[in-house]
Amino acid sequence: MPEDPRHTDRPSVAHLSAPLDLRNGRRLPNRLMKSALSESLGAPDCGPSPELERLYRRWAQGGYGLVVTGNVMVDRRHRGEPGNVVIEDDRHIEGLKRWAAAFQGALPDASENAPENAPDSPAPADRTPLWMQINHPGRQANALVGKHRPVAPSAVAARVAGAVKPRELSDTGIREIIDRYATAAALARSAGFDGVQLHGAHGYLITQFLSPLSNRRTDAWGGDPERRRRFVLEVLRATRAATAPDFAIGIKLNSADFQRGGFSEEESQEVVGALVAEGIDLIEISGGSYEAPAMMGVMRPSTAAREAYFLEYAATVRKLAGDVPIAVTGGFRTVSAMDEAVAAGECDVIGLGRPTCVLPDAPRRILHAGAHSLPSANIRAGMRPLLGRVTNLRQLDGILDLSWHTDQLHRIGAGHHPDPARSVLRTATAMALRNGPTAFRAKRG
Ligand SMILES: Cc1cc2nc3c(=O)[nH]c(=O)nc-3n(C[C@H](O)[C@H](O)[C@H](O)COP(=O)(O)O)c2cc1C
């Protein structure tokens, strides 16, 4: 029988397919993680929707080592964008339970009706864990959606089109938000999620506290690096106290915010050290914000040319982190680069974002079907000379890229297949319809 050419030169996946034990006693079945992708599929009352369940059923069959949800807001008055799920009390607990169950009950044979303990159903210990990413957007909240003035460590507006000057938080206000993270984590646990991931990246509230550009306070919450990182550490302590030791708490952390005078790699390394000492279970490295969208590869060409944007930085914190696994997200597309990064000890887990929108079963293809690389859609605005005169093209490209991938999630949620050939113009139209007047503001992530 002629040899199937697809099976002749398979890239090595020896390191990617190895399970990974976390400090909390749970095991990730392999090293491929679906990173948080804001789905914008919340119901009008901010609870989870059937579309969200459908999307997660699809990812459940993808063979991931870990799946992290898109960011769920801890305060309905402060939301990143329309369609965010909000978790602030138990009013949506049944919907949250269905969301987790849709993911955990899905079987690898794709048969939704198969019984829970069918022979090919993974044993609970080997199931892909599902973590909920929890977030407060701070000054990046969309004021038209939350109908409240955004809050932040200091009254400093983000440098993006349409940004509103936030109100400076009081000490009481800060403590109330810390409690909200803890409440959200406790509810996620009751609903059946296996862990939470704190969103400490991309310019949201935790990063606003960490960066000297957005945190100008001189009280107990700012003034020097130690006081600037107090907020994230208090959030970690409160979420830990509200849950149980076997419930995972991870964080997505910026390597830097890529702005002069901002959060530096040195400070980020100190934060990693402090989080490890406080008992974090996994640290995912990303970078940038919507002022400088490094997480989407929109940055200096020399950095973007490297396949994994933040790998070099991650390798420096890998040593610091001891037995706490480090994940890196941003730019990974070839299987050889992924396996080599783990083999070289530069990171332990590979985070995948955009490829999972067009290929929900990316890990299965990598680990079991010999895939060499994942698709990479190059989404950029057209009419560049003209648009470049009236808008920041980097930010616009970032927004279009996010929206094109959100469209793919909406297709899956509606029961369709992703459409890799979708035009950027259709995305721009869908964006305008979905978000109304706020459509072209730099947002999300
Ligand atoms: C549609 C979309 C939504 C996103 N939403 C989130 C989010 O809710 N939380 C987050 O931490 N990152 C979010 N991100 C960033 C991704 O998790 C990831 O860091 C980024 O896409 C880079 O990884 P990639 O090159 O594999 O896509 C989002 C990205 C996209 C494209």
Image (tube, rainbow, N blue to C red):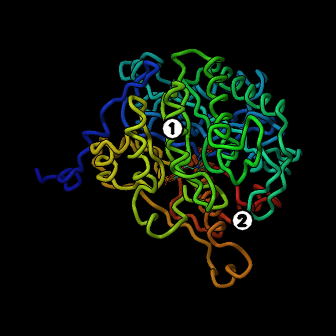
Q: Earlier in the sequence, mark 2 or mark 1?
A: 1
In the picture as drawn, the residue positioned furthest to the bottom comes out as 385
Up the image or down, 423 lies above or below 363; here it is below
User: Image point 61% across, 57% down: which residue?
Assistant: 402
Dot 2 crowding, Cα within 10 Å, few <14, some 14–19, many 20+: few
* Residue type of the residue flagged with mark 2: Thr
> Camera-side residue: 10 or 389?
389
- Estimate the x, y position of residue 77 in percent, counting from the top left: 84, 39
In the picture as drawn, the residue positioned furthest to the left comes out as 1
* Residue type of the residue flagged with mark 1: Val
Question: Pointer 2: what residue?
Answer: 429
User: Image point 55% across, 43% down: which residue?
Assistant: 253
Mark 2 Cβ inside 8 Å of ligand 1:
no
Q: Kindly state the secondary structure of the residue where label 2 is placed.
A: helix
Q: Which mark is residue 272?
A: 1
- Estimate the x, y position of residue 47 in percent, counting from the top left: 74, 32
Up the image or down, 55 lies above or below 421; here it is above
> Camera-side residue: 195 or 117?
195
- Estimate the x, y position of residue 278 in percent, counting from the top left: 54, 25
